[in-house]
Amino acid sequence: MCGIVAYLGKRKALPILLEGLKRLEYRGYDSAGLALANGKLSVWKSEGRIARLEERVGQQPILSTAGIAHTRWATHGAPTEENAHPHCDQSGKIAVVHNGIIENYQTLKVFLEKKGIQFSSDTDSEVLAQLIGHLYQGDLEDAVRAALKETKGTYGIAAISSEEPDRIVAACNGSPLVIGIGEGEYLIASDAGAIVQHTTQIVRLGDGEVAILDRESFRTTTLDAKPVEKEIDDVEYSLEEIELGGFEHYMAKEIFEQPKCLEDSLRGRMRLEDGKIVLGGLSQLSREIVRARRIILTGCGSAWHTCLVGEYLLEELARIPVEVEYASELRYRNPIIEEGAVVIAVSQSGETADTLAAVREVKEKGAMILGIVNSVGSAIPKETDAGVYLHVGPEIGVASTKAYTGQLLVFTLLALYLGRRKHLSESAFQAYLRALERIPDQIQTILELSDSIRIAAKEWVDRENWLFLGRGFNYPTALEGALKLKEISYIHAEGMPAAEMKHGPIALITKDMPVVFVATKNSQHAKIMSNIEEVRSRGGRVIAIATEGDDEIRARADHVFYVPDTLEPLQPLLAVVPLQLLAYHAALLRGCNVDKPRNLAKSVTVE
Ligand code: G6P
């Protein structure tokens, strides 16, 4: 997500910080800022990319040798100059850059406001700066520790005080930070890639640890000030390797980071301690949404597939009638929007032209519009009445993977949130929460199938026509599996409800036709087993996604990829992962550029 870089040494900090930010820009790029200590703190911020920040400060003859900097990918608050980091406390003596999400920021904000502190941004991060400032009594190290003890959530932070210009304090919990040890200088970065050109000697800060950097030395402690001995690593990566986190492609990185991204997305929203779902972005309108008479879901590409799952989820769990529309059709169809209609627009980028136009069309007709979007501050959230962000971080690979599961997760949370207010019993709701909590770990186990999926893919990648079939909750997964395969490997693939096969596509089945069945154990399992038989009896070859322990299917398929069991409405979150891996390996085996497939664009801003 966001990026941090900081410097304390003998050289001018400004060019080192700007260059470090540029190297981190791939993590987030909607706004940026930096603070330099030079007698007082000088802070610059700007909306947009680092080049704009550079234009703003680049010409200043600043001699400061200590500073902190940040490039933002917004989670709380739009990507504006006010919301950009660093955030300062009210006195302007302390500046903080923060990666992560402070879950209890609202409670802390109310506490600080009661003490007379005025906030100047909408971010969770400013709360940290204000809290550190409030607790500051001349020792930054103590104030940071005291503030973090009150904080719930994830953070990687760097803090500086104008009263202690020879010191930077950093801390980390669930959001990585490394300390770079140079010759007579120290650096901090959220990603070693920002600083490897200055030093390859790196200390990785652990969760719950604080680093205190002075000009001559540095030390690490726990939040309780107990000293921690750290090992120094020698990193020798190319920059690209570091940005890709050791993966060959962004698509692979994004597939493999899904457990962590979904945990991030769940954080603070699914509260097991008091058995609640909290969707802050919808709280103002929750009564109207619960009373919705009809919901229309719209999007394009993979987002349209998540809308199909959304339809099943919202009807099953919240018992609200749902329609799904391609945004490109909805925008021109003169749709009927009656009293009580709620439209939900789904988009990773928040910029897709057809989805944006559909939003504007239904807005004209008076619908309430909600957004499920990944990119904070993009065009669609600006036009909607309320919404839920995915919080899965920037997606760079053109084929959607973590944004897809992120959208499914938000739909699941929304359906449960509405369901509990309508028909869902407390015990059923709690069972869903417990199952949802396990999803990130269950995806982790599915990722271990990667090698066996690659081996199986080798056998099939020269076949030019594939079918993907599923029923019920697995039907949209079949569509998404086919889309993933065709968009990055250029194999022709069709997805459809399994029962539809007999109305035409069955004519295509031969021994050269791989048919992928999404056949997890659920209410339609017996039906899909019959469909498998229909394919086999015509010589078709079967690849199955099945639930662990389903031995019956092993005897009927050429390859089976097992996923852990979960409640039926949550199965799309798991069953899609082997299909993402299948498409990825097939594309690589066919020598395709998986991150930038031909003719496609990540963000389609034309009709
Ligand atoms: C493009 C991308 C797809 C994406 C679709 C919708 O076609 O290649 O991966 O699903 O746009 O994009 P959005 O940003 O609105 O989710």
Image: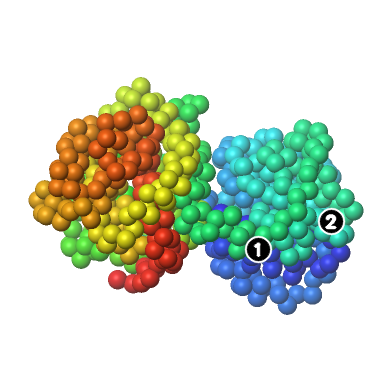
* Residue occupying image coordinates x 51% and y 48%: 257
Residues at discs 2 and 1 in contact (Cβ within 8 Å): no
Residue 149 visible within the image:
yes
Badge 1 amino acid: Ser
Q: Which mark is residue 165?
A: 2
Q: Position of residue 537 (x, y in %)?
A: 15, 43
Residue 42 visible within the image:
no
- Number of numbered discs: 2
Left-right relation of 554 to 400: left
Residue 42 occupies which quadrant of the picture? bottom right
Quadrant of the frame with the C terminus: bottom left
User: Neighbour class for label 1 at 10 Å: few (<14), some, many (≥20)?
Assistant: few
Q: Position of residue 16 (x, y in %)?
A: 74, 67
Q: Position of residue 528 (x, y in %)?
A: 20, 38
Q: Which mark is residue 238?
A: 1
* Residue occupying image coordinates x 79% and y 75%: 61
